[in-house]
Amino acid sequence: MSNRYAQIVFSPAAVEKQRQAGSFPDYGAQLEERPDGPQELELHESGFIRNSDSFFLGTVTPDGWPYIQHRGGPQGFVQVLDKHTVAFADLSGNRQYVTVGNLTENNRVALFFIDYPLRQRLKVYGTARLVERADDPDLVDRVASAYNGAIQKIAERVIVVDVEAYNWNCVKYIRPRFTKERIDEAIALERRDAAADRRSLEAEIAALRRENDSLRVQLDEARARV
């Protein structure tokens, strides 16, 4: 855990509860360190984000209410532009524009990625900026390139997030769930292994039959000499 992450999420009330519970030495020490700058996304985090097909996006309304929205797409729909920046296309939806409106007032966001089969989850904090298609159509098309042509065209804008901090959660209480693609992949692997085992077994049976035929010939020859 970085001290930048601790500075963002550990409020005085949270720190007090940590002291009461005896967990402050495990968590709160980061608050006493010299403040650091934004965290860099390493290979593990970048790969996890690129392989995700969904995440939850948290923003804040002008009145201070949290707003959570699910975002989904093909793997790679969230792009890692560099060690400090991720981006994803904002597609035309029900045209409520709650997230867009929130970001106009308060650009702070939280991105929550979770991989149910691997039981891993990654929290990312950052500041977001809206890039409209009219302002940078090339960027919108590039970030939306993970979608097919028809969906790519309904990308209205790109949401670019400058990463401030991130943290991995423990696997506790994550119940594994599997997508159809992962189940199909697992079945294909099982079938491949079963086919390989079957071929090996058939080869072994064929060898035993040849050995049996050879022994029968030897037995017939021995009987003929008696």
Image: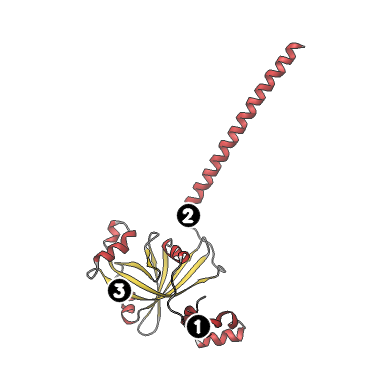
Indicate the position of residue 15 as horizontal and vertical percent values: 54, 85
The mark lying in front, picked from 3 and 2, is 3
Mark 1: amino acid: Phe
**Position of 95 relative to 53 (above/below):** below
Residue denoted by label 2: 182
Mark 3: amino acid: Leu
Indicate the position of residue 174 as horizontal and vertical percent values: 54, 67
Q: Please name whichever residue, 16 or 191, is drawn nearer the observer in this view of the structure.
A: 16
Residue denoted by label 1: 10
Which quadrant of the view contains residue 213? top right
Q: Earlier in the sequence, mark 1 or mark 2?
A: 1
**Position of 164 relative to 140 (above/below):** below
Residue 8 appears left or right of 90: right
Indicate the position of residue 77 as horizontal and vertical percent values: 37, 62
Mark 2: amino acid: Arg
Q: Secondary structure at mark 2?
A: helix
**Position of 80 relative to 223 (above/below):** below
Badge 1 crowding class, 10 Å Cα cut-off, few under 14, some 14 to 19, many 20 or more, is: some
The mark lying in front, picked from 1 and 2, is 1
Indicate the position of residue 53 as horizontal and vertical percent values: 41, 62
Residue denoted by label 3: 130
Residue 96 can be seen, yes or no: no
Marks 3 and 1 sit apart, C-alpha to C-alpha, by 28 Å
Which quadrant of the view contains residue 218? top right
Badge 2 crowding class, 10 Å Cα cut-off, few under 14, some 14 to 19, many 20 or more, is: few
Q: Earlier in the sequence, mark 3 or mark 2?
A: 3
Residue 223 appears left or right of 8: right
Marks 3 and 2 sit apart, C-alpha to C-alpha, by 34 Å
Quarter placement of the C terminus:
top right
